Amino acid sequence: MDTVLQISQRGVEMPESPIRKLSPLAYQAESDGVKIYKLNIGQPDLPTPQKALDVLKHVDRKTLEYSPSQGYRSLRVALTGYYERYQIKLSPEDIIITSGGSEAVLFAFLSCLNPGDEIIVPEPAYANYMSFAISAGAVIRTVTTTIDEGFCLPKVEKFEELINERTKAILICNPNNPTGYLYTQKEMNQIRDLVKKYNLYLFSDEVYREFIYTGSPYISAMHLEGIEQNVVLIDSVSKRYSECGIRIGALITKNEAVRRTVMKFCQARLSPPLLGQIVAEASIEGTEQYSRDVYEEYVERRKCLIDGVNKIPGCYTPIPMGAFYTVAQLPVDDAEKFCSWCLSDFRYKDARTPEGCAGETVMMAPAAGFYSEPELGRDQVRLAYVLKKEDLQRAIYVLEKALEAYRKEVMLAGK
């Protein structure tokens, strides 16, 4: 008699990505000739630095060999100079190169936490934190921030309500994905004091540090005094150099015991990507003008998207002070249903629609997937302003038309 093979409980609990779960609908729409304005994912449309592309084109190695498990020392030395620009003083030994920032998060959890240990995370939060916690057997406990308060950090009492004997860490993303919120000095001091009081790890995801749109200084977890041994910093070159595909990140800590443990996992996965490290190293020096131009472009894109969304009747988004995302509230009862409908059913056409195109639509990430409770964020979406301004303007216009059609065809019709 045939028996059904069982999927692991870990696999059952693993959530789908709110960023990528609607991709099958998008693939079908594109195959039907629909033009999609993709605001769902943090994939910049800006070119990678030419210097890095040139180095990649002229790789003259005879063998594409394994690299050291901790990454090439030359890359780690270059990164110490990069962090020095932000008043973060490191040695190359403090830095471990990983296969993207994602692997850095996973290895941090695996190295610092036991199954059942708890991590406190402000939400909405990057959805993959939950996935990595499940992989490590850890538990995410959330403190909720609200769109009405601009996603500012809750008071310390909200954190302390969650702290118990299983609490081992606090995780922050600064500037924040998905909200674009930037933590203030006061908020960072609040986190520092909690970490110190309860002797917790502080996992700090800082991959968007280049994108800060305020005169306030950038406060890294590495700047906080008195918790140097508690901090594990997560980084990546994906966003700042438009190099998502080379999969190069870093785990950084002054805690030697943590580094020794992380190295065991690094050795088990052998080495980070060889070609990715070559490209990343070439991107660090001599690209200052590139970084300034990219920053100025995102300043303009942010204004374009935020102003445009807030002009749509019933829509609201606070002004993000960092990263290149915002969470927007829409006049819909179920944002995931609306996002799916935009891809499966909605096709907008007018005189500006490209000739031969079956129609235009928008792709967004339903924000409920960035919260722990399914009822939170039901009328919200995460938008990434990673398209050129002309495309953002068109995307906003198409979004407004989609909302008008959805209200008539679905909500008022009771479908």
Image: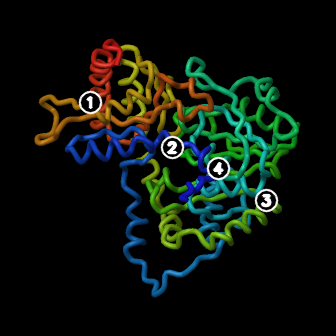
Q: Which residue is mark 3?
A: 258
Quadrant hosting residue 24? top left
Residue at 47 percent of width and 63 percent of height = 246
291 sits left or right of 207 in the view = left
* CB under 8 Å between discs 3 and 1: no
What is the secondary structure assignment of the residue under circle 4?
A: helix
Kindly report the distance in space between the C-alpha atoms of the residues bearing marks 3 and 2: 29 Å
Q: Earlier in the sequence, mark 1 or mark 4?
A: 4
Instruction: Locate the N terminus by quadrant.
Output: bottom right
Amino acid, disc 2: Ser
* CB under 8 Å between discs 2 and 1: no
| Depth check, front residue: 28 or 399 | 28
Eyeballing the image, is 362 above or below 33?
A: above
Q: Position of residue 14 (x, y in %)?
A: 59, 46
Residue at 42 percent of width and 72 percent of height = 55
| Front: mark 3 or 2 | 2
What is the secondary structure assignment of the residue under circle 2?
A: loop
Amino acid, disc 4: Arg
